[in-house]
Amino acid sequence: MCHNIIDGRFHSTCGHFVGMSTRLQDCNRPDCLFSRRHEHPVGCKSHQCRRMMSLPVHNPIRLSDSLCGDCIIRNPLSRGC
Ligand SMILES: [Zn+2]
Ligand SMILES: [Zn+2]
Ligand SMILES: [Zn+2]
């Protein structure tokens, strides 16, 4: 099944992932609605065809040892040391 791959930054301190860009990984199956190889690009009525995408996959292209933006806002006391 097709799924989105989210490129982003992984913050090792808080364990959060911050996405920066999303791209579609095509499964190239003729029975998948999201694939470019889908057999019925217009008005697909086949019950065989998959209408769901798999869960997105996180692809950490950068690592950060600091807190993410959300955690810095939520924990103002954690700034600096
Ligand atoms: Zn697919
Ligand atoms: Zn179809
Ligand atoms: Zn965080």
Image (cartoon, rainbow, N blue to C red):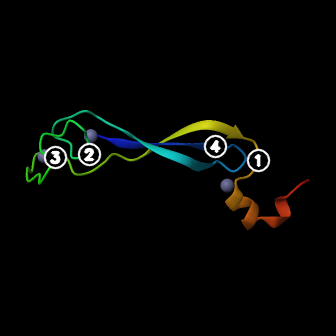
* Dot 1 or dot 4, earlier in sequence: 4
Q: State the residue position of label 3.
A: 41
CA neighbours of label 1 inside 10 A, class few (<14), some (14 to 19), many (20+): some
Q: Mark 1 and mark 4: span between their CA atoms?
A: 9 Å
Q: Mark 1 and mark 2: span between their CA atoms?
A: 37 Å
Q: State the residue position of label 2.
A: 34
Specify the amino acid type for callout 3.
Answer: Pro
* Dot 1 or dot 3, earlier in sequence: 3
Specify the amino acid type for callout 1.
Answer: Ser
Q: Mark 4 and mark 2: span between their CA atoms?
A: 28 Å
CA neighbours of label 4 inside 10 A, class few (<14), some (14 to 19), many (20+): many
Residue 62: percent from left, percent from top = 65, 37
Assess mark 2: CB under 8 A from ligand 1?
yes
Helix, strand or loop status at disc 2:
loop
Foreground residue among 64 and 28? 28
Horizontal side, residue 51 vs residue 44: left or right: right
Q: State the residue position of label 1.
A: 66
Q: State the residue position of label 4.
A: 10
Helix, strand or loop status at disc 1:
loop
Mark 3 against mark 2, which lies toward the viewer? Answer: 3
Foreground residue among 71 and 26? 26
Contact between marks 4 and 3 (CB within 8 A): the answer is no
Specify the amino acid type for callout 4.
Answer: Phe
Residue 25: percent from left, percent from top = 37, 37
Q: Residue at x 68, y 38 (%)?
A: 63
